[in-house]
Amino acid sequence: MNSELVKECLRKFSEVLSFNYPAVGWYFSSENIEDSFIYKRDRWVCMFMYWAIVLKKGKRIQFSADCGKACPGIQEFGGFTPPVDDDGKFIAETERFKQTRALAQAYYREYVAEIHTPPEKFVYVEKIEKIDKNREIEVVNLFPDITGLANLTGLASYDREESGTLIPFASGCQSAFSTPYNEKFKERPKCIVGLMDVLVRRFVPDDMIMFSVPANRFVEMANNIEGSFLDKNFNNPTSF
């Protein structure tokens, strides 16, 4: 979705909801954009260790197949490098996020099925307000307070028979990008409540929760605000 359209939709949301942190967007590009933050390749880091440079300093982070040891999550989940199959050992025995290696391996098969070949050499994450007008945003990350999360969850189901939101077992970078990006390709894309990764919670503020939306669904939801329970002109007669 064109970044200018996404920005206009974000303004609609900002009129009726409050957010703890600025919204960010993900977009692909063939360009090695100047002044982007690039991780040092020789040591492991989690992308959320550097999340503040996006939200507070307005930097964009670049990801590609050439990140070395740094942030392997987006390299793998973003389709830039083949995912490592260790037969479930790391998740089950090192992190203990799954009871058995068989369960960990089932999770591996599930997330591998979500991975798409990236259309360009790079993917970037940046505050939406700073993204150039010629960019095509793939995924939007919102950071609501708890009331905002309830409202977003309600709006995600406003035009659906089924729930429009998922809270999956997923890594932080999965919930930020690859899982909502995969939803983009579905007939009825869903929103993802993220940052439920136990490891990632060490690197983000206690009041940070993520609501990730494929950009096509984000536009639909923004257009549904008028006439819904979030409409500024609606006074709910059941409100106390």
Image: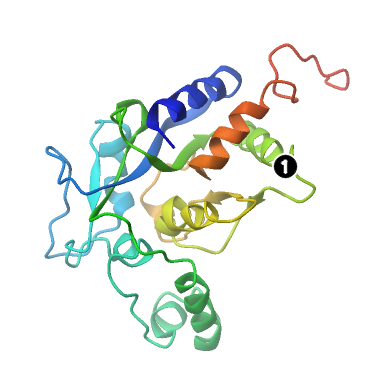
Q: Is residue 209 visible?
A: no
Q: Quadrant of residue 235?
A: top right
Q: Residue at the spot x=43%, y=58% of the render?
A: 178
The colour scheme of the drawn protein is rainbow
Under mark 1, the amino acid is Ser
In percent of width and height, residue 165 lies at 65, 49
Q: How many marks?
A: 1
In percent of width and height, residue 211 lies at 53, 43
Q: Is residue 192 above or below residue 68?
A: above
Quadrant containing the C terminus is top right
Q: Is residue 163 left or right of residue 12?
A: right
203 vs 162, nearest the viewer: 162
234 vs 170, nearest the viewer: 234
Q: Is residue 50 above or below residue 97?
A: above
Q: Is residue 61 above or below residue 56?
A: below
Q: Residue at the spot x=41%, y=61% of the render?
A: 199
In percent of width and height, residue 223 lies at 62, 27
- Which residue was labeled with disc 1? 157
How many residues crowd mark 1 within 10 Å: few (<14), some (14–19), many (20+)?
some
Residue ranking furthest to the right = 238
Q: Is residue 30 visible?
A: yes
Q: Residue at the spot x=32%, y=36% of the render?
A: 135
Q: Residue at the spot x=76%, y=51% of the render?
A: 162
75 vs 182, nearest the viewer: 182
**Helix, strand or loop at mark 1:** loop
Q: Is residue 82 left or right of residue 237?
A: left
Quadrant containing the N terminus is top left
